[in-house]
Amino acid sequence: MQLAIDAATAERLAGVRRLGAARIRPLGLEADRLGRPVPPDDPYFQTLLELGLGRTRWSPESSSWKSQKELEVGASRLTLLLAEEQSYWDRGVAVAAPGPGLGEPPLLSMGTDEQRRRFLGPFVAPDRPRWGSFAMTEPGAGSDVAAIRARARKDGGDWVLDGEKSFAANASRADWIVVWATVDPALGRGGHRAFVVEQGTPGLGDFKIEKKMGLKAYESTSFTLRECRVPAANLIGGEGTYAARAGFKGALQSFNATRPLIAAMAVGIGRAALDASLAFAREHERLADPRVRDRLERGARKLRMARLLALRAAWLADHQRPNLTEASMAKAVAPLVAYEVASLGMELLGAVGGRGDHLIEKLFRDVKAMDIVEGTGQIQRIVMARQLVNLPREVGGA
Ligand SMILES: Cc1cc2nc3c(=O)[nH]c(=O)nc-3n(C[C@H](O)[C@H](O)[C@H](O)COP(=O)(O)OP(=O)(O)OC[C@H]3O[C@@H](n4cnc5c(N)ncnc54)[C@H](O)[C@@H]3O)c2cc1C
């Protein structure tokens, strides 16, 4: 799919492509075969650091995050294009890459300068692969984020956290985890607080890597908090931030940045499925059949449409403009399109797909989660429908 891009972006994409063929795809296939995430000490992660990756977007030179964002016009679009390309080679390996991950947006949008320095500072020029993590989901609270039950209790100068979290990416290897908890479930979203819980804090433990149908190269991890004591300085933004349900709004603002990214990743997986389907159809002399060509063309066309939706949402973010509907639209559309393309690939494969050792079959398993993470497709459609009729935003989903 052609796209007008400048020379610097083209060079960075070419770099990802080289890395993708040589390292990302083979690592993803190996993790899938072995059914375990890429280990944190894999030399690939060190290679990424040497290439200048695995870093934070935050810079210690900027006086505030807002002023830095104003200097960074184009950053969201570039992040999106790189994420799409990495996911083309393997989305699981892309998420396994070191960096502050989904823990970064709440620190950027809600954190104090001091907290950014403390928690994002080590990611400016990391001395070793480092990870951050984000834990909203609980066994009983996914789409309905207001239902989280992890409790936060103030005790002197500390906060004490108790509860269970599930499916948090890279949690067991992370330096810290952004944990969402409630001071009082009866307050609904008004009770939400976000804390940075550092690895090794007493009471943080029971890490268990979940079994997944796809995307096996990165860990999705459950863990518990038992009388887990964190200093007041780790409450993101400080107590004043949480007036007027700002905690919940902060979480939702993060989604406006991350949902277009998930859409771009889905487009990457879909492109990989399309290319593999084209190669299989060519090899098995199926391209002479107009029905096969028609379906392949439909997949290519829909992937391009999905990519444009994601880029539109990123463009709005880059220009400091509201993108709630566009972010949800991209997230609602792209995973389904990628799923459709991977399904077509499975149909073309026929019995070969049933053997479970073809790239398309892996992509078919990988793509399913893209409709689930960062708010399911249903949740995105609820968000858009509420926007359409001017109702306030009320639903989330990590
Ligand atoms: C691979 C993977 C990685 C993940 N990574 C993270 C992470 O890093 N951090 C994190 O915090 N979480 C993470 N999650 C969790 C993810 O955010 C949740 O799975 C998601 O929000 C859905 O929640 P649930 O699984 O509890 O499903 P539920 O909320 O129980 O939903 C089940 C079904 O019901 C539908 N549904 C729910 N509510 C409504 C409604 N009001 N109207 C219509 N339909 C509805 C949903 O769309 C879905 O189809 C991850 C999940 C996966 C699979």
Image (cartoon, rainbow, N blue to C red):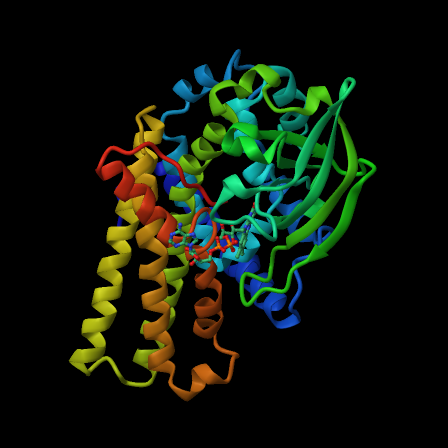
Could you tell me which residue is drawn at 61 percent across and 24 percent down?
A: 236
Q: Looking at the picture, does residue 40 appear above or below residue 79?
A: below
Near-viewer residue (274 or 52): 274
Q: Say which residue appears at 35% left-offset and 72% top-offset.
A: 343
Give percent across and percent down for residue 200: 81, 38
Q: Can you name the residue that lies furthest to the top here?
A: 63
Q: Is residue 2 visible?
A: yes
- Mark yes or no: residue 310 visible: no
Along the line of sight, which residue is nearer the eye, 17 or 111? Answer: 111
Q: Quadrant of residue 280?
A: bottom left
Could you tell whether 1 is left or right of 170 in the image?
Answer: left
The residue shown at (57%, 47%) is: 137
Q: Position of residue 324 (x, y in %)?
A: 33, 35
Residue 136: percent from left, percent from top: 57, 42
In front of the other: 23 or 100: 100
Instruction: Residue 347: name its quadrant.
Output: bottom left
* Residue nearest the observer in this picture, 389 or 27: 389
Residue 5, quarter of picture? top left
Residue 3, compared with residue 371, is above or below; it is above
